[in-house]
Image (cartoon, rainbow, N blue to C red):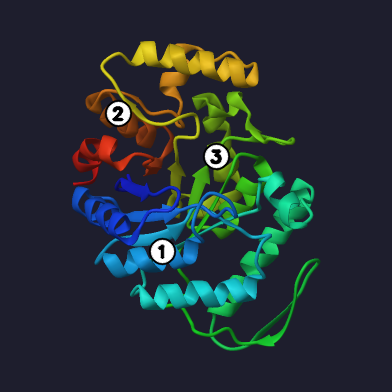
Amino acid sequence: MRPFRFLATVDGYPGFAELTRVAHKAEAVGCSALVVPDHLIGQYAPIPLLAAVAAASERLRVGTFVLNSSLRHPAVLAQDLATLDVLSGGRLEIGLGAGWNKPEHDAIGIAFETTGVRIRRLAEAITILKGCFADGPFSFSGEHYTITGHDGVPKPAQRPHPPLFLGGGGKRLLTLAAREAQIIGLAPRLVQGDAPRVDARSLTAAATEEKVGWIREAAGDRFGELELNTYPTGGPAVITGEPRAEARRRADRIRAQTGTDLTVEEILDSPHMFIGSVKDLTRKFTDLRERFGISSFLIDDLDTLAPVVEELAG
């Protein structure tokens, strides 16, 4: 089995002192990386923030979780990412996504295209990133981008490129991830609308089993090389000695928000909800690795979950 990897994160607008504190604690308890999302509201820009984290740490890897491929030309993004990889001493992990937040697109006048179009755009962006990272000039002609004799510089420190992280909850995106990525994030499906929301049934262990099956089918012989990741989409991690009571409260909130009924057992078994004592969660992460091959976990509250990380990653 793959060793456990835990990913710390930060929210909002932390100052450099707070970033340094989180980075040092993440390194000390055994986290592998610090990752940040990519949104135009409610946070710093991810790449400058990660450069600050890399400067404040020694071993901690840095990554995006995940970049919206619709917001940047991939050749320009490649230069930013390769620069960060070089300056961090080869510690970058590149998380990419097709973009899911329609209101964010609407706010700046970028069309929020259909899922199929966004996934095709993402696939082209991956091809261009890899072309920019490779030695020598390359050309590309696709539905969304055209590259003519471009030699991307600088080249990243990690060769042939930093690890690619792709995630999603639907078959098309997970199939692309299985063919192109080194790390795959298992995400819930989203129901689009004025306010996108999670499809609650896709939070369950049964849905995760189906997703892993799609990945296995598409990856073929390379499935054993892939790292699988999950994160607490179903609500923040909670350390408690009464997990069933907290799970009932969580089920009530999900029913009120989505109209979907999940049982207490489905809540506690979900790969996207971390509720229980330190011992419970240590056992749960171990069980998820054994059952699904999930060895990478995003930690939403490092201070709360540090004992679990220390137990499993030490």
Q: Is residue 276 above or below residue 47?
A: above
Residue 233 in the figure: left or right of residue 59: right
Q: Residue 281: which disc? A: 2
| Other residues around mark 1 within 10 Å, as few (<14) / some (14–19) / many (≥20) | many
The amino acid type of the residue labelled 3 equals Ala
Q: Is residue 76 above or below residue 194?
A: below
The amino acid type of the residue labelled 1 equals Leu
Residue matched to label 3: 187
Q: Residue 50: which disc? A: 1
The amino acid type of the residue labelled 2 equals Leu
What separation in Å lies between label 2 and label 3 (alpha carbons)?
19 Å
| Element class at badge 3 | loop
* Disc nearer the start of the sequence (2/3): 3
Q: Pinpoint residue 20: horizontal percent, then vertical percent.
A: 27, 59
What separation in Å lies between label 3 and label 1 (alpha carbons)?
23 Å
198 and 162: which is toward the camera: 198
